[in-house]
Amino acid sequence: MNDHYLDRDSGVYENQWWNSANDLTALADLAIIDPSFETIAQPILETAFEKAPQSQGIATFENAWYDDEGWWALLWISMYDLTKDPKYLNEAESLFKDMAASWPTPCGGGIWWDRARTYIASIANELFLSVAAHLANRTPNRDDKASYTNWAMKEVDWFNHANLINGVGNIIDGIDLDGCTLNHTDVFTYNQGVILGGLVELSKVTGDASLLPKAQAIADAAIRTLTNDNGILLEKDSQDEGAAFAQFKGIFIRNLQQLHSVAPKPSYANFIRHNADSIINDAMNHENYLIAPVWQGPFRDPNMGAQGAGLDALISAASLGNKRDEIPAKKSSAGRTDQRLLARTRNLT
């Protein structure tokens, strides 16, 4: 991924902004479970922290889209988990503050998708929940912890009342401003994923175990309705297009693994491993380790979004024995992962 797609001067992949935040998150997550990878990942991540905004002509990680800010906030939270350097947590807190300033929308709450206030997207609100809950579990300040927890609970309440889940249990894309109607009914895998990680983190900070069955219901619906006959995750009726759509599936798998780490189900572990195996066997070029957007194969049209998604899936499979919510000591973390799969995963970077 880094040899084929990374601009090493900026830490950005192929000038793709939100996708880069996710690809970089995969690097941080791999370094967390594989200490030998940290010396490779950390310089890239530090370059992105210092130089990525300038590559886009902006001064900070704040931009015109609140979902973009959420992706970058989650990346810096992962970097805080890896390094315990407070500068990363501070950056995530700053981004969250900007996101929170867009609450409420005219539809009874929630945040906007964009600074121009043209759309209310599920993904922006799921990211808002996830960032708030992640911060609540990490901030050393008691008042800030209470504030982040309150924001996360407020978001969950609004999300429930907005009726963003359709009749088969899938989260739809968003709300039309004309009467706050649910006209944007497209279903994407990442909308089924981000909320899982958010609910996991909120259950930890509040002790509310009832949030986990709600997350499982969303995950189960996605596995039931967004897969082919062989159990391979699909995007948009199996038509994976470009880096954006290709990225979505990895986000679902990453968050499913986080749910499995605290509310394990054999079906989740099997699903993650089965999709990782399909990537390796059917969607990967074994000469250059590039990955196709369609995980059931055949290999064709690789791109940076597909590479990041594949990396997410293999990291998730490798770390099934490693609880994501309890970052282990470096000496013991590698022993709790699938070492052969880790070796394959490092090749993808």
Image (tube, rainbow, N blue to C red):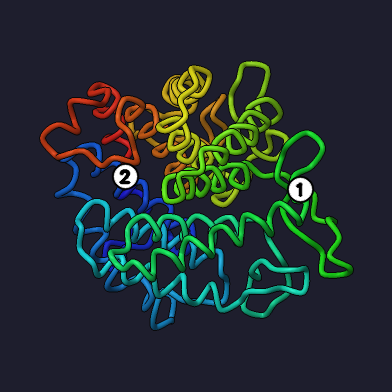
Does any portion of residue 253 appear in the rendered image?
A: yes
| Residue drawn at the location 46% of the way across and 50% of the way down | 206
Looking at this view, is 44 or 78 the one in front?
A: 78
Q: Counting residues from the N terminus, which is met first, the one under dot 1 or under dot 2?
A: 2
Callout 1 secondary element = strand
Please state the horizontal and vertical placement of residue 190, each as a whole percent of the image: 58, 46
Q: Which residue is mark 2?
A: 29
| Residue drawn at the location 56% of the way across and 76% of the way down | 64
| Residue drawn at the location 80% of the way across and 55% of the way down | 184
Looking at this view, is 94 or 288 the one in front?
A: 94
Question: In which quarter of the view is residue 57 placed?
Answer: bottom left
Please state the horizontal and vertical placement of residue 275, each as a whole percent of the image: 50, 24
Classify 10 Å Cα crowding around label 1: few (below 14), some (14-19), many (20 and above): few
Please state the horizontal and vertical placement of residue 51, each as a whole percent of the image: 30, 73
Residue 8 placement, left or right of 178: left
Question: In which quarter of the view is residue 91 placed?
Answer: bottom left
Question: In which quarter of the view is residue 53 placed?
Answer: bottom left
- Contact? badges 1 and 2 (CB < 8 Å): no
Classify 10 Å Cα crowding around label 2: few (below 14), some (14-19), many (20 and above): many
Residue 298 placement, left or right of 111: left
Q: Which residue is mark 1?
A: 186
